[in-house]
Image: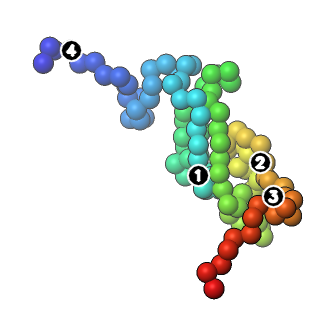
Amino acid sequence: SNGSNSSNSSKGSNGNTKDNNNSNPSVALLIFDECQHATKNHPMNRIMREFYLPLETLSAPHVLGLTPCPVKSLAKSPGKGIEELERNLCCKLVTVVDESAEMHQWVAKPRTAC
């Protein structure tokens, strides 16, 4: 040992490992799968609160959230659930348009073994 006590990251006051230079993160894109869970104290939501939101807008990474269903409970209040996800992930909800009829004109029908 050379007596040096250096490391690539430092511990924040809350004990979490954080990059020393939050204004220039080395992450360009955050991808969250199953992002419908980014509510309350879920780890995805905590990542956004503790590491993403404090960044300057120009240096913040892009965020891509993937989900099969944008709101955990559509029956209760879909509008509020969508607003909460958009707020928590600093995003705008976007869905695909069903183009299956047009797609079938270009895609071969699968052969069946029967």
Residue 98 numbered mark, or none:
none
Residue 77 in the image: x percent, y percent?
79, 63
What type is the residue that disc 2 sits on? Leu
Disc 1 to disc 4, how far (Cα)?
40 Å
Q: Residue at x 45, y 25 (%)?
A: 19
Disc 2 to disc 4, how far (Cα)?
48 Å
Q: Quadrant of the N terminus?
A: top left
Of circles 2 and 4, the one toward us is 2
| Quadrant in the picture for residue 34 | bottom right
Of circles 4 and 3, the one toward us is 3
| Quadrant in the picture for residue 76 | bottom right
What type is the residue that disc 3 sits on? Trp
Residue 33 in the image: x percent, y percent?
58, 52
Mark found first going from the N terminus, 2 or 4? 4
Tell me the residue that label 4 is attached to: 4
Mark found first going from the N terminus, 4 or 3? 4
Of circles 3 and 2, the one toward us is 3
Tell me the residue that label 3 is attached to: 106
> Can residue 98 be seen at all in this image of the molecule?
no
Helix, strand or loop under label 3: loop
Residue 38 in the image: x percent, y percent?
61, 51
Check contact, mark 2 vs mark 4: CB within 8 A. no
Residue 93 numbered mark, or none:
2
